[in-house]
Amino acid sequence: MKKSPWQQRIRRAEELASVHPYAAEMLRFYALLTGFQEKLYRKLETASNRTPMPASHKQLAGPPELPELLSSFGEFLSFVKEVGPARSAEIADELKGQDQRSWGGFLNQFWSGSAAADSSESESLFARSFLQPYAELLRHRAAMQWPGYSHSLCPFCNRKAGLGVLRQMGDGGQRSLICSFCLAEWSFRRIVCPSCGEEDNRKLPVYTAGEFDYVRVECCDSCRRYLKTVDLTKNGLADAVVDEIAAAPLDLWARQQGYSKIEPNLVGV
Ligand SMILES: [Zn+2]
Ligand SMILES: [Zn+2]
C-alpha cells in the first residue's frame, strides 16, 4: 500500500534524525507531531462526512466548523505535554489550565488570520500545528487548481509561504512556494522576494552551505527577510517540508547575518 504523505514525512524525519544528531530531538518531535496530525485528519475526515461541509468553499472561511475539532484540543495539549520539547510541554501545561472558551478564542483568531494582534508566538505555533490538518482537509475537499496564480500569499488560505521547493522543469528548476499553514503549493517566479516583491537579483542573494548544499537560503537585502528552498533537482530523496526543518543550522546562520524568516516552521524555527 502506498504510504500516506504523513507516513512519508515521518519516515524522512526518522532518516534525517539518525544522520543529523543536532536536529534529532526536533525531528523526532516533528515525527510524533505528524503522527498526531494524521490521526486528527482522519478523525475530522470521518466527522465531516457525517456533517457535510459546504462544497463551494474556495477559500478558508472561518471560524472552524467541526465540534470534533475543538474537543480534540485537550488531547493535543496532553500529547505535547508528554512528548514535546521542555518549553512547549510547559506551555501545553499552562494552556491546559484554561477553559475551552479561551482555547476557542485563540484558535478562531489564528484561523481567521488575526492572531498576530494579541496572541503570543507560542499560542500561534500551537494553533498552527493543531489546525493544520483541518486546513489541509478543507483544501483537499475544495480540490482547487491555481493556473496562472502568481502572488506571494497562499491562494487558498491567504497565509505567507513557509518554504520553497525547486522541481525539475526542462533544463532548470521551477520554484514553488509551500504555504506555512495549509501546505498548498503554487508556482512562484525565482527572482522575486516573496516578502516584499523585490526583483533586482543583486539584492536577492542565495546561500548554500556544507552538508545541506541542496537547501538554498534565499535572502532579500531590501526587506531583510529570507526563506529556505529545498532543491529537489539536487536531492531527489528530500521531502521539502522535513528537510527544511532539518536544515536548522542555516536558519541560525541567516539570523546571524541579520535576516529574519518570513514565517517559522512547525517546530518554531
Ligand atoms: Zn494555505
Ligand atoms: Zn524582500
Image: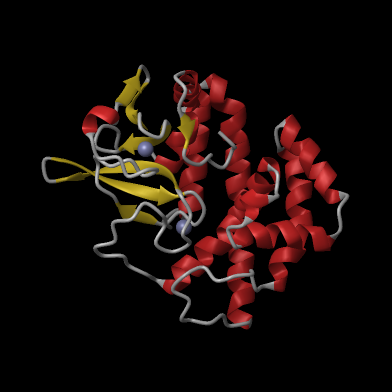
- Front in this rendered view, residue 254 or 2: 254
Find residue 216 and report its image quarter: top left
The answer to whether residue 201 is visible is yes
Q: Position of residue 24 (x, y in %)?
A: 57, 26
Which residue corresponds to the image point at 37% horizontal and 54% vertical from the top-left? Answer: 185
Find residue 222 and report its image quarter: top left
Q: Where 49 sits versus 69, above or below?
A: below
The answer to whether residue 72 is visible is no
Q: Is residue 106 left or right of residue 224?
A: right
Image quarter where the N terminus lies is: bottom left
- Front in this rendered view, residue 205 or 12: 205
Q: Is residue 41 left or right of residue 164?
A: right
Among all residues in the image, which is located at the extreme front? 222
Which residue corresponds to the image point at 79% horizontal and 56% vertical from the top-left? Answer: 74
Image quarter where the C terminus lies is: top right
Q: Where 260 sits versus 187, above or below?
A: above
Q: Is residue 168 left or right of residue 35?
A: left
Which residue corresponds to the image point at 64% horizontal and 66% vertical from the top-left? Answer: 43
Find residue 50 and report its image quarter: bottom right
- Front in this rendered view, residue 96 or 38: 96
Q: Where 84 sits versus 169, above or below?
A: above
